[in-house]
Each structure stands twice: as structure tokens, then as C-alpha cells.
Amino acid sequence: MYHIVEFKIDNGHEVAIVPHNWLKDNCFVYWPPYKTSVRLNNAARKMEPPSSETWTLEKMTRVLYSSGKKLTLEQESGFDNSRAFLVKIVKGPWAS
């Protein structure tokens, strides 16, 4: 299962598609340390297990939408995930 989740970043909100195993307690998301949208998308697509040693735990605002498959989620919601990952890398507190 995948979710579209919302994060509060600076003075705005950003969204990303994440697999269910990246969510913690329905208010946090484990975020991988990868710096490219290709690597982030591959990790999400493969539902890569989070590592509490290298991944950051980010507070999310809410789950906007959920679906059983990533492709279905993107089609049903009209959401472009490649942009969301890129925005999070550039604007998020995890950007270096």
C-alpha cells in the first residue's frame, strides 16, 4: 500500500508518495538519505525497509490519499511523484 502524505516545510506544504512501511504511528515518515529523485523513487517503488540508523524521521501533517499500488495511486490522484521527491530534497530539512 502507498500513501500520499503532506509535510509542512518552511511556510508551505509539500507532498510525497511513500510506501506504508515508511510510516510510523500515522504521524511520522521515515525519509531515506538519498539525494536523487531516481534513487528515492526506486526505494519507494521497492518498498525499501527504513533504517533507523541512516533514515530521518520526519513529522507529516496528514495522509491525503491511500491506494494498494503506486501506479494506481498516481493515476487515481493525478499526482506527479517525481516532482514531490525533488522538492523535498531541495527544500526539506534533510537537504544537505
Image (tube, grey):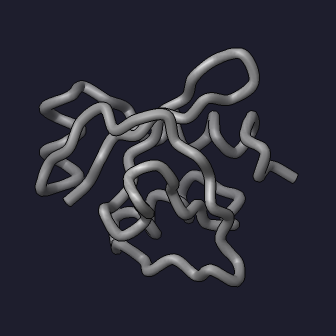
* Residue found 34% across the figure and 73% down from its top: 46
* Left or right, residue 83 beside residue 18: right
Q: Residue furthest top?
A: 11
Q: Is residue 56 above or below residue 80?
A: below
* Residue found 40% across the figure and 40% down from its top: 5
* Residue found 29% across the figure and 47% down from its top: 3
**Residue 86 x %, y %:** 61, 40
**Residue 25 x %, y %:** 41, 60
* Left or right, residue 91 beside residue 80: right
Q: How many marks?
A: 0
**Residue 37 x %, y %:** 57, 52
* Residue found 21% across the figure and 28% down from its top: 77
Tell which of 54 and 43 is nearer to you: 54
Residue 81 location, quadrant = top left
* Left or right, residue 38 beside residue 75: right
Q: Residue furthest front?
A: 25
Tell me the quarter of the image containing the N terminus: bottom left
Q: Is residue 21 above or below residue 68?
A: below
Q: Is residue 34 above or below residue 49?
A: above
**Residue 43 x %, y %:** 46, 69
Q: Is residue 42 above or below residue 62?
A: below
Tell which of 54 and 77 is nearer to you: 54
